Amino acid sequence: MRRALLLTLAPLALAAPARAQDHSGHDMPGMEMPAKPAAQPEQDPHADHAMPSTQGPDTPAAHDAHQGHPMPAMLAEERAPSGTDLPPGNAPAPAPAADRAADRYYGAEAMAAAERGLRREHGGGTFHQVMIDIAEYQPRRGGDGYRWDGGAWIGGDIDRFRLKSEGEGRFGDRVESADVQALYSRAIDPYWNLQAGVRQDLGPGPRRTYAVIGVEGLAPYWFELGGSLFLSDKGDVLARAEGYYDQRITQDLVLQPRAELDFAFQDVPENAIGSGLSTAELGLRLRYERIREFAPYVGVSWERRLGRTADFARARGDDTGGVDLVLGIRAWF
């Protein structure tokens, strides 16, 4: 009996130290134990997110970056078209604003002067140029020759006054042919000018004065072309066509083929001009354009009097033309 009681109490004696290690419920003197935080419910990271598949086709976007911004089409409807909004055409420009804040602050007179300066600085000014296309020396048998072709102009983008002159001769001898033209030039489009004025011959023989009308400009593919019609004070009608093309070979070398043709609608014996194609000049010049304002060149020029004009030249003991080596400069300022 005694042995059975001991065997029953033994497990209880072994379990007593384990219970003694649990301090829960023990009050430690002088210490305050922190209260346990309340258990928080687990949150879903995607809570409140609207999934695309859950939005219907008519559901507005919740966060549209452009929401409330006026669209350009809306702005265009709110204001009248102006400037580049207007359709292309030749309609007159709109009148400038009459009641400007700057006028009230600076005064209308001061602002008018400022406007004139603005127009002058942006294409409304007066410009000028002197252009010498040809100033050359031509070594020839029986006397070296020379030739010039150039002009000058002053004015604006639309209206200009223009002087042109060309001629040739021999050193130590008379000028063979020369003329000067004074022209009013008006732009008829961005590339072409209509010209009208007078021409005065300066060469040998009777010196005629002509009324002139012509055009000059830049043709497609950068061909410089010009044509003139002359009506003399004696009723003679002449014409001239000329053109050239600048072919840039390198940054400094420019090859320029050039042609000039003169026509007459009748014989003018006193000036040794026959009807038809009277003279032709074809040239090929290689220009060294290191400095554009002053470019020397070398080339060849073929000039010939033709038809009845050649007959008049032979009758006067003059040659009818040939091929010349030319050395010259092209300059402008």
Image (tube, rainbow, N blue to C red):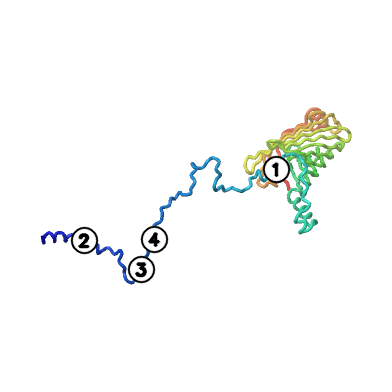
Spatial CA distance of label 1 from label 4 is 69 Å
Q: What amino acid is labelled 1 in the image? A: Asp
**Which residue has dot 1 on it?**
85
Query: Is residue 261 toward the left or the right of residue 235 in the image?
Result: left
Does the residue at mark 4 contact the one at mark 3 (Cβ under 8 Å)? no
Mark before the other along the chain sequence, 4 or 3:
3
Q: Amino acid at mark 2?
A: Ala
Tell me which corner region of the image, top left, top right, bottom left or bottom right, holds residue 313: top right
The residues bearing labels 3 and 2 have C-alpha atoms spaced at a distance of: 29 Å
Q: Is residue 61 left or right of residue 13?
A: right
The quadrant in which residue 214 appears is top right
* Numbered label attached to residue 32: 3
Residue situated in front as seen by the camera: 241 or 307: 241
Indicate the secondary structure of the residue bearing disc 2.
helix
Quote the CA–CA distance across marks 2 and 1.
Answer: 98 Å
Q: Which residue is mark 2?
A: 15
| Residue denoted by label 4 | 37
- Residue nearer the viewer, 143 or 55: 55
Instruction: Say if 244 sits above or below 38 in the image.
Output: above
> Crowding near pointer 4: few (<14 within 10 Å), some, many (20+)?
few
